[in-house]
Image: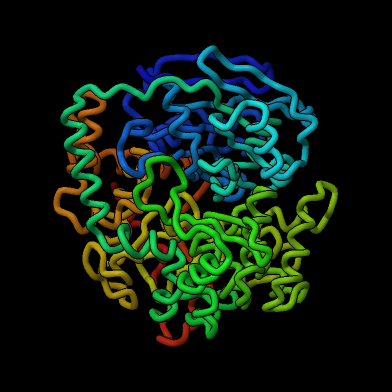
Amino acid sequence: MSRLLRVNTKDKTFAFSDMGPYSGMGGRALTSRIVSREVPPTCHPLGAKNKLVIATGMITGRPAGSSGRLSVGAKSPLTGGIKESNVGGSFAQRLARLDLLGIVLEDKPEYGSSPSYIVIGKDGVTFEDASDMQYLGTYDTVKRLLDKYGEKSSVLCIGPAGETMRQNASIQVADPEGRPARAAGRGGMGAVLGSKAIKAVVIVDTGEAPPIVDKEAFKAASKRWVEIIKGHPVTAEGLPGFGTAVLVNVINEAGALPTKNFREGRFEFAKDISGERMVEIIKERGGKVKEGCHAGCIIQCSQAYHGPDGKYLTSGFEYETVWGFGANLLVKDYDQMAMLDRLCDDIGLDTIETANTLAMLMEAGILNWGDGAAAIEMLKQVYDPKNPMGRIIGGGAEYTAKAYGVTRVPTVKGQSLPAYDPRAVKGVGVTYCTTPQGADHTAGYSVCQNILGVGGKVDPLDKAGQVELSKALQIATAAIDATGFCLFVAFPVLDTADGVQCMCDMITAASGNPFHPEDFLKLGRTILQDEFAFNQAAGFTSAHDQLPEFFEEPLAPHNVTWDFTAAEMQAVKAM
């Protein structure tokens, strides 16, 4: 029977319990249910009443391909609403091997308390002093902890941004190579961990894999699962061949690549920042073109990018990061973009939010458009806990825009828009507006149908069908986030008749409890209902379900505008 671990960060006490009312839940279902039931919606996100929930998926820890994702949830200091941030790395699978589905970090020490780190093993939990790692970057933090507890341990931690509770702070998770390059980035989850004076959580002495009730049925379903993923061109060829940056040329050609803070839909130097160009550089310098962000990944869309000196610089170099530090800022130097990515991972900042924050500084004339070198030096200021500019940058795009009087601010519910212009990919625009998570492409990735032709085709430039598309995808996405599967499995699942059934068969075989496609969809709806209810109680209204007014400007090359009203968005919330 899987358990919950509750940790009181003020008293430094802990207790294991059964799942109780949360039985059968995992991943985003678990984080959002605990937050919605136990966190007052109007509480301060950095106060004692907020809780940080870390959860494995329903299937995590078993031999199911690409099932090692981790959900981190809380009330967001960036959006003021509920948040789940999803991340790879080795932590989820190691947690599952301790028979734990979730960790709930509660209360908080007095402000200014010395940091601690938590060590979780088969025999219990200990709190260790982290004063010698205070304000240390995540790369050095993880190295110290793995040196102390062994390479088979797993670490999640925060950098200086989280420790100083900046609204854009991420939680970084070590990958199978021991690099903290996987980020629970969006929504400021690192600030919540920092508010509880916890520098890191370490898992040691992991036990046995979670049980499988019907091993033969699980084996058959798992085999079919591999066939589905390996048989689709996106997950078998595009993503492992070029990483998610394979999308740069595709989205640019579609006229939807946001350029110079969403002024244009195409970047004249797109080829210079494409996935194809990234692979060329990696091969030239002896890096690694494909690798998994967690053990058992059968897609392998991550990579190891080496700098000009031939040494490792960064990994998990995602399309959204490449766009943000590239076309969004008019930068075309891959090494500069890679260094910005490395700095975000080490400081503990979300790359999407940080890229838009740097754009705000360019709008204000503090930085020049296209000056990647100056952006690097600017970002380094976040390391210093007393640096005023670093404090502003760490607060995110909206915070920085307010500091400098910038009005062209691409945010919804306080969170920055990612790498798809909503005027030219209207389905993802509906998702930006309506997801409880704040502007988030992964919450309902209509790029599949709008651009890629996966799971059908819906004209990206036309309003017709977009609300229905986004709603369906948001339901399915929430359910996938609960299982622990990587969201990228959605590509083959959308094009495969028995894709959802196969996921359900694995869950049924593992748990012994029947789980059908209708249960899968019900799960997604339930998650969204929890999240919508929390946000409503926190003060969100239909007025928050809309894009900034500058999206009414025509976007070249198609000269399309955002032509939905906030009232039209409300159909998404009817569950």
The residue at the point 60 percent across, 44 percent down is 180
Please indicate, yes or no, whether residue 177 appears anywhere in the rendered image.
yes
The residue at the point 62 percent across, 14 percent down is 13
Q: Position of residue 453 (x, y in %)?
A: 26, 69
Front residue of 318/384: it is 318
Count of marks overlaid on the render: 0
Front residue of 86/111: it is 86
Q: Is residue 129 above or below residue 370?
A: above
Q: Position of residue 257 (x, y in %)?
A: 47, 75
Quadrant holding the N terminus:
top left
The residue at the point 47 percent across, 82 percent down is 555
The quarter holding residue 173 reads top right
Front residue of 563/510: it is 510
Q: Is residue 547 above or below residue 390?
A: below
The quarter holding residue 452 reads bottom left
The residue at the point 21 percent across, 41 percent down is 223
Q: Is residue 96 above or below residue 432?
A: above
Instruction: Please state if 367 lies on the left or on the right of 94 as rendered.
Output: right
Please indicate, yes or no, whether residue 550 appears anywhere in the rendered image.
no
Instruction: Please state if 206 lies on the left or on the right of 306 as rendered.
Output: left
Q: Position of residue 312 (x, y in %)?
A: 62, 56
Front residue of 404/360: it is 360
Q: Position of residue 110 (x, y in %)?
A: 76, 26
